[in-house]
């Protein structure tokens, strides 16, 4: 057998091995989809991502508590800005009494 024929045989063996691996992965995927469904897979992925984001948020809060406290205070002040502005106007406006 010449070099080219040996290369063709080696390529066929590699192709068959790759096809067998692909079929194995595909069969496992089909079984998983049949067991959990697409919605279940999406929900599992969403829960996993949410856990990662929460863990990262906890890390940020632990590293920078002052910045988080200041941000929350600013948010609360922004949410109550209209009653706060009205109170300041009533308190300091000399013409309203």
Image (cartoon, rainbow, N blue to C red):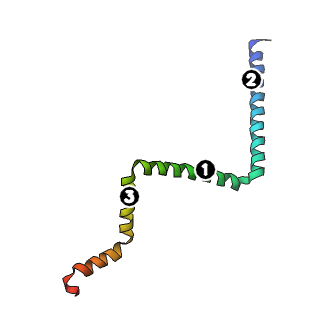
Image spot of residue 55 (x, y percent): 52, 49
Distance CA(mark 1)–CA(mark 3): 27 Å
Which mark is nearer the camera, 1 or 3? Answer: 3
For the N terminus, the image quarter is top right
* Element marked by disc 3: helix
* Element marked by disc 2: helix
Q: Which residue is mark 1?
A: 48
Lower sequence index among marks 2 and 3: 2
Q: Which residue is mark 3?
A: 69
For the C terminus, the image quarter is bottom left
Question: Which residue is the extreme one toward the right?
Answer: 1
Q: Quadrant of residue 16?
A: top right
Which mark is nearer the camera, 2 or 3? Answer: 3
Is residue 86 or residue 70 the one in the foreground? 70
Question: Which residue is the extreme one toward the bottom?
Answer: 97
Q: Which residue is mark 2?
A: 11
Lower sequence index among marks 1 and 3: 1
Lower sequence index among marks 2 and 1: 2
């Amino acid at each position: 057998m010449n070099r080219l024929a040996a290369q063709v045989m080696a390529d066929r063996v590699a192709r068959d091995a790759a096809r067998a691996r692909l079929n194995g992965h595909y069969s496992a995927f089909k079984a998983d989809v049949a067991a959990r469904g697409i919605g279940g897979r999406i929900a599992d992925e969403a829960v996993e991502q949410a856990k990662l984001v929460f863990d990262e948020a906890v890390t940020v809060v632990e590293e920078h508590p002052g910045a988080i406290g200041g941000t929350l205070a600013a948010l609360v002040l922004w949410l109550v800005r209209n009653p706060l502005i009205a109170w300041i106007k009533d308190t300091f406006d000399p013409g309203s009494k």
